[in-house]
Image: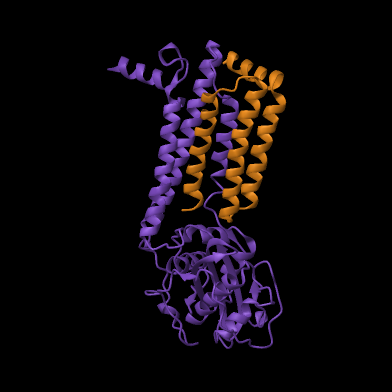
Amino acid sequence: MYTHFKKTLRHIFVPGRHNNHQASSVSHASLTAYLCLAMVSFVILRNLAAQTGNVLGFATDVSTVRLMTLTNEQRVAKGLNALVYNPQLAAAAAAKAQDMFAKGYWAHFGPNGESPWNFILAAGYQYDSAGENLAKNYVSSNDVVNAWMNSPTHRDNILKPSYEEVGFAVVNGSLQGEDTTLVVQMFGSRIGFEQSTPNQQSKPESSNAPIQVAAVIPTITPLPTATRAPQVLSGSYKGLPVSTDTNIDRSQVKVEMTKPTSASPSLNLYPAFRIIIGILIALLIGAFVIDFYYISKSEQYIHRGKHIAHLIFLVAILIAMFFLGRGSIM
Amino acid sequence: MKHFIQHIHNEVWHKNLFDYLLITLFAVFFLLGMRLFSGQREAQFFCIVAFTVGYIAWGVYHHILTRTLRIRILVEYILIGFAVLFFSLTLTFP
């Protein structure tokens, strides 16, 4: 039994006469199997995304409930008040996301000078101080909040003591011809709110771009229809403390610690696929290193591709996997 | 291990230094591109396609120069390149 196992391993990994001086793990048959596996994994993930309603062909596990929970967890951990969900700020965030899709920009300020504060005021929210965080193309809520917390300016927004309320929008659409998931987070504290800090009045905060307050309340005109209508992914706020007026009972604010229910099975599979693909590429690298080692030792060179080139290619791809599936913040 | 190190040294330093510098340069630009276009799925995918095509082209170029180009060698590069391309596609567009 042991001898048979050893012989099989030798056949798979060690080149020699028994396998025509090429380890079967890096033979054409094995590489073809790798290619088939790659194609099957791609088809499976795409089909799962399509079945779960991600009509634009991409999937995201970002939810407003989870974003709210994670944001408040960060604040509570720093001894700050938990933010209350405000529908007006959420409406402002949704309008901002729709505007970015309609006009094709990815910034705090629109091409015609539209500022975040315009959207907040247009939604009927009279702010004392306000702020905005943006993210796009993240796969999970945790990734979004982690990215914001790793950026000093975004972290300052999340941990600003004067903010009392927050609204989120998670919207799918086509931005500059690319399928995109936009996340807009808008913070605010209303004029006359008890806990507002006096010295922060009339100073909206926007990551990367401090600006002056807009003096005129703008009206938002209906947006032109995009080629693909943006799809709001997270419109349900059930279970979150909702602010309807300025008299907020802070005892009702609780940080939800339960895990969110998954809206998309494909997203549960994404981290698993990421690990499995990483392992498969690492295995291929290992197989080439072993094959290369024994070939150089036996000096039995047959007509083969260059191991060093294969290894440079595979290692670069393995490193690049860290940059795949990551979004960007603004 | 001595044979292994010696073989790598001969192969890279004495025989094909320019060729390996070229593919290393491809890899460096590829990684820079991936970092630069973080969050832009289509741009990242373009980087992966460009690197894969560059890798296969490098294989053809190198084996033509060393007069060792065979169909089975070309197939080896294509199989590795396309397998990695599909794996990357899976992760780029979840």
Quadrant of the image occupied by residue A251 = bottom left
Q: How many marks?
A: 0
Look at 40% across and 68% down and name the residue there: A256
Residue A186 shows in this picture: no
Furthest residue in direction front, as rendered: B71
Q: Is residue B26 left or right of residue A195?
A: right
* Residue B43 x %, y %: 60, 52
Look at 44% across and 41% down and name the residue there: A38
Figure colour scheme: by chain
Quadrant where the image shows the C terminus of chain A = bottom right
Quadrant where the image shows the N terminus of chain A = top left
* Residue A96 x %, y %: 57, 75
Q: Residue A102, relative to residue A29: is it above or below?
A: below
B77 or A209, which is in the foreground?
B77
Quadrant of the image occupied by residue A242 = bottom left
Q: Is residue A12 left or right of residue B51?
A: left
* Residue A169 x %, y %: 50, 72
Q: Residue A292, relative to residue A134: is it above or below?
A: above
Residue A217 shows in this picture: yes
Quadrant of the image occupied by residue B41 = bottom right
Chain A: drawing colour: purple
* Residue B89 x %, y %: 50, 47
Look at 45% across and 27% down and name the residue there: A28
Q: Is residue A78 left or right of residue A266?
A: right
Chain B: drawing colour: orange
Furthest residue in direction left, as rendered: A1
Look at 60% across and 35% down and name the residue there: B55
B38 or A191, which is in the foreground?
B38
